Amino acid sequence: MPISLSAYLLVTMLSHRMILLLALLFLCGSTDCVSDANESPNDLAAPSICIIGGGIGGAATSYFLRDLVPKASITVIETATVGGRLATINLGGLPHESGGSIIHPANRYMVNFTSLLGLHKKKPPSEPMGLWDGTKFAFLESQYTALNYISFLWRYGLDAFRLHYWVNDFIGKFMNIYKEQDDGRVFDSVAELIETAGLGGAVGKNLYKFMEGSGFSERFLRELIGAVSRVNYGQSASQLNGFSGAVGVAGAMPGLWSVRGGNRLVVEALIHRSANLVRGTATSIVATDRGYAVTVVPSARGDSVSALLCDAVVVATPLTADTSNLTISGVPGVSFPFPGRFHRTVASFVSGSPNAEYFNCDSPSQCPRAVLTTDNSTDMFNSLAVNLPTTEPSSNTSNRYWKVFSKKLLTQNELNQLFSNYDEVRVVDWTAAYPHFPSLNSSSFPPFRLADRLCYINAIEWAASAAEMSAIGARNCALMIRKDLIKSGTLTDTRPSRGSPSDRVEL
C-alpha cells in the first residue's frame, strides 16, 4: 500500500537512527551504553558538545562554549584528576604546585578567570637567584637589590634594558591575538594565528637566532636565556623555536603570580560552572552522518562502556603516538596520530638542605634559593628552587621543600651530591610535560580544524606550551564549534560571537 511522503521521511529517519543505535549496542554490549543525556544530539535548542580532556584547555573551552551556546549540553571527559598539567602535591600536609606554577600579568584569560571565580593571587617569594654552569655560579644575586643591578650591568651590559623592551614588543604583538578573538575570528591553523600576531618569523628559527638580531650578547643568551629555557621547557634555547622560547622568557619577568590554593582550582571551578563531568577514557571518535560517536571506558570498575552521541567534539589532549591511544575514524584528509614527541620532566620535592660544598657556598644558608643551570651546563638537573605551599603567604619560610627539575629520575648518589641532608623525597614524573619544540615552519604544525565540528586545542602547544596558550586555543575552538553548528543548521544564530571577554564572555 502506498505511504505518504511525510511517513516515508519519518521511517527513513528512524531507520538511520536504529542503524546507529544497533552499531553502538554491538560495540558496547548493552543498552546502558547509550547516554540518555545525548539522545537528541541535533536538538536545535540544545546541541550536544563533548570535550575530551579535563585540563585548562578543556575547562576553558567549556566556559567559552557555555557563553556562546548557552543551551548546549556540554560534557567534559577526563580519565584522571581534573586539572591536567595544573596540579598540586601534598607535602607536609600542605599543597604545593607540582605542574604549571606561574601566571603572567599579561595572560588575559587566566587573569580574568581568576577574578571571575573569586580566587586570589599569590605572588612568589623574592629571593636570591644564581646561574650555575656546572662548576661555579656565572652570576649570583645577593639580598641587596641595588648591588644586584650593578652586578648584572657589569656582566651583561645593556642586555637587561634591551630584554625589557624586547619582551614588551613581543607581548604587544601577542595581544593582537586577543583582539582578533574579540572580533569573533576563527583560526583553522596555528600558522594563521601566529601570523596574525606578526610573529610568524619566530617559529622558523631557534630562540638564539630569533634574539641575536636584536643585539643580545652571546654570553647573555647562553647564560640567562639558556637558563630560563631549561627551567621552563627543560630544553636548550638552541632547541626551542623562537615563539615558544619568547613565551618562556616572558614568563620569567617580574610580576608573576599563582592562584592561592593551586592553579588547578581554576580548572575545577570552570568545569563545575559550565559542564557535566564524565570520569573515563575516551578511546575512539567515529564520525557519523549527524555528528560523532565518542566511546568512553569508565574510570570506575564495574561501570559499562558508554558511547556519547555528540553534535560536536573538542579534543583537549595531545594526539601524538607517545601520549595518546585515542583513535579517530571517518575524518578524511587527516592522519592520526600526529608526528612529534613530548618531553619528559621529573619534579623531585626534597625536604632538606642544599650541599654547600657542591655549590661552593660558605654554608647552606648562603646558597641561592633558586639555582638555574646555564645552557653549557652538563649537570644532572635543570633547576633547583625553594617551593612554598600554595596556601600560605610567600613570606613564610618554615618547612621548606626544594623542587628539582631534571630530565630523568635522580639517583640516590645524585641527590646526595645536591643535598647535604634530607629526610623526604617525593617525585612527580611528567612523562609528557611539553612538546619537543622544533624550529619548523608553522605550517607543519597540526591544525585546529580536524573536520566540521571537530576541533583540536592542543595544536597550539607546538607553538608554545602554557596555560594561557591552552586558553587561547580553547576560545578558538569554542568560536569554531559555534560557527560550524550554525552552518550545519544544528544551532540557530541567536547571539553575536563578537565582543571582548569583559562584555561578551562575562570575564
Image (cartoon, grey):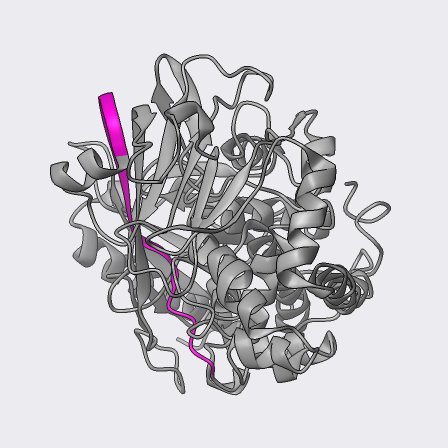
Residue 504 placement (x, y as % from top left) = 82, 49
Tell me, yes or no, whether the highlighted magenta stretch contains residue 261. Answer: no
Q: Is residue 438 above or below residue 78?
A: below
The secondary structure making up most of the magenta span is strand
Q: Is residue 477 left or right of residue 306?
A: right
Q: Is residue 89 above or below residue 409?
A: above
Q: Nearer the viewer, residue 155 or 278?
A: 155
Query: In the figure, residue 347 lies in which quadrant?
Result: top left
What's drawn in magenta, residue-wise?
419-439
Residue 315 placement (x, y as % from top left) = 44, 60
* The C terminus sits in image quarter: top right
**Residue 165 in sight in this render:** yes
User: At 60% across and 50% down in the image, what residue appears?
Assistant: 252
Query: In the figure, residue 374 lies in which quadrant?
Result: bottom left
Q: Nearer the viewer, residue 30 or 434?
A: 434
Q: Is residue 231 left or right of residue 340?
A: right
User: At 71% across and 59% down in the image, what residue appears?
Assistant: 160
Residue 289 placement (x, y as % from top left) = 43, 72
Q: Is residue 90 left or right of residue 231?
A: left
User: At 53% across and 41% down in the image, what residue appears?
Assistant: 129
Tell me, yes or no, whether the highlighted magenta stretch contains residue 426. Answer: yes
Residue 118 placement (x, y as % from top left) = 70, 24
Q: Nearer the viewer, residue 160 or 150?
A: 150
Q: Is residue 332 left or right of residue 142?
A: left
- Marks counted in the figure total 0
Query: In the figure, residue 209 lies in which quadrant?
Result: bottom right
* The N terminus sits in image quarter: bottom left
Q: Nearer the viewer, residue 377 or 261?
A: 377
**Residue 453 in sight in this render:** no
User: At 33% across and 32% down in the image, what residue appears?
Assistant: 356
